[in-house]
Image: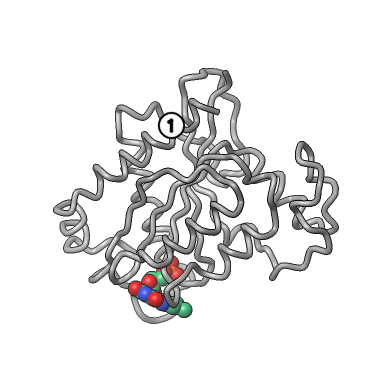
Amino acid sequence: MPPKHVAIVTCSTRTPRLNPTITQYIYDVLASDPTIPTRKATSPSNTDISPDTDPRHITLSILDLAAQSLPLYDENVIPASLPPTDPTPHYSKEHTRAWSKVVRQYDAFIFVTPQYNWSIPASLKNALDYLYFEWRGKPAAIVSYGSRGGGKAAEHLRGVLNGLKMQVVGTSVGLPVKFTGLPVGNLSEVEERVEIDERDLEGWKEAGVEGMMKNLGMELVCELDKA
Ligand SMILES: Cc1cc2nc3c(=O)[nH]c(=O)nc-3n(C[C@H](O)[C@H](O)[C@H](O)COP(=O)(O)O)c2cc1C
């Protein structure tokens, strides 16, 4: 059995944004869990997975939707109507073929989504809608964040992922963001440096968030073992 590749997906695409900071936090929690046999990806672009032949390994990568630069959905084919085993060449647009190739590299996904007006950001729905068989049947997990943890976004996302016939694990994690904020001013160069406020981190620890995150990781690994 080959090693498995798990993408931790950064779902908001605006500048500035909090999402890369939250995604990195989740990556760090999962990568530090000795019960999850992770191996860090070597490519910062995370679309180029280096070879690994150890079947026990799970490679965790961060996949940033902002880096995909997908336009608002403009395909003229319906993804679910394409050949299931190799849909990629059948898309009408080069950006869809490129996105299809990226997603096909991964065996499972952890979607890290903010809540926008009680739902997921349009960037995430757009990226999901572009494809179908590239998602279908693969394990997925949800981490949301918002002032109260982004539970409504998580609920909507679960419905969408079920529609794509993904294997969504039972545990989802909601991170209430009460104190962490983006600095003011021209931020296009500094967004990666936004730090999680200690008071939020403390609140998450008290709520057992890191333990829940590890459960989520283990559930994903169990789903991957079934595949
Ligand atoms: C368009 C928009 C809608 C939002 N709606 C909600 C909401 O419904 N509930 C909530 O808790 N926070 C909401 N927020 C606050 C976001 O959770 C917060 O701005 C967070 O930083 C967004 O993630 P991002 O910075 O990675 O884009 C909203 C923010 C934006 C930009």
Task: Give the total number of marks visible in the rendering.
Answer: 1
- Tell which of 78 and 109 is nearer to you: 78
Q: Is residue 164 above or below residue 4?
A: below
Classed neighbour count for the residue bearing mark 1: other residues with Cα under 10 Å, few (<14), some (14–19), many (≥20): some
From the viewer's perspective, tell me whether residue 70 is left or right of residue 160: right
Seen from this angle, which residue lies furthest bottom?
Answer: 185
Q: Position of residue 155 (x, y in %)?
A: 42, 61
Is residue 24 positioned above or below 85 on the image? Answer: below
Tell me: 107 left or right of 134: left
Read off the residue under disc 1.
221
Q: How is the image coloured?
A: one colour
Residue depicted at 36% across the width and 51% down the height? 172
Q: Is residue 182 visible?
A: no
Q: Position of residue 141 (x, y in %)?
A: 44, 47
Residue 29 horizontal side relative to residue 45, left or right: left
Residue 117 in picture, x, y percent from top left:
44, 77
Q: Quadrant of residue 186?
A: bottom left
Q: Residue at x 74, y 50 (%)?
A: 98
Image coordinates of residue 200 in percent, x first then y, are 21, 62
Q: Quadrant of the C terminus?
A: top right
Which quadrant is home to the N terminus?
top right
Above or below, 108 relative to 54: below
Q: Nearer the viewer, residue 197 or 161?
A: 161
Badge 1 marks a residue whose secondary structure is helix
Mark 1 lies within 8 Å of ligand 1 (Cβ measured): no
Q: Is residue 12 visible?
A: yes
Q: Dividing the image into four equal quarters, which quarter contains ligand 1?
A: bottom left
Compared to 204, does 41 lie above or below? Answer: above
Q: Residue at x 33, y 53 (%)?
A: 173
What residue lies at 34% left-to-right and 68% top-to-bottom? 146
Callout 1, which amino acid?
Val
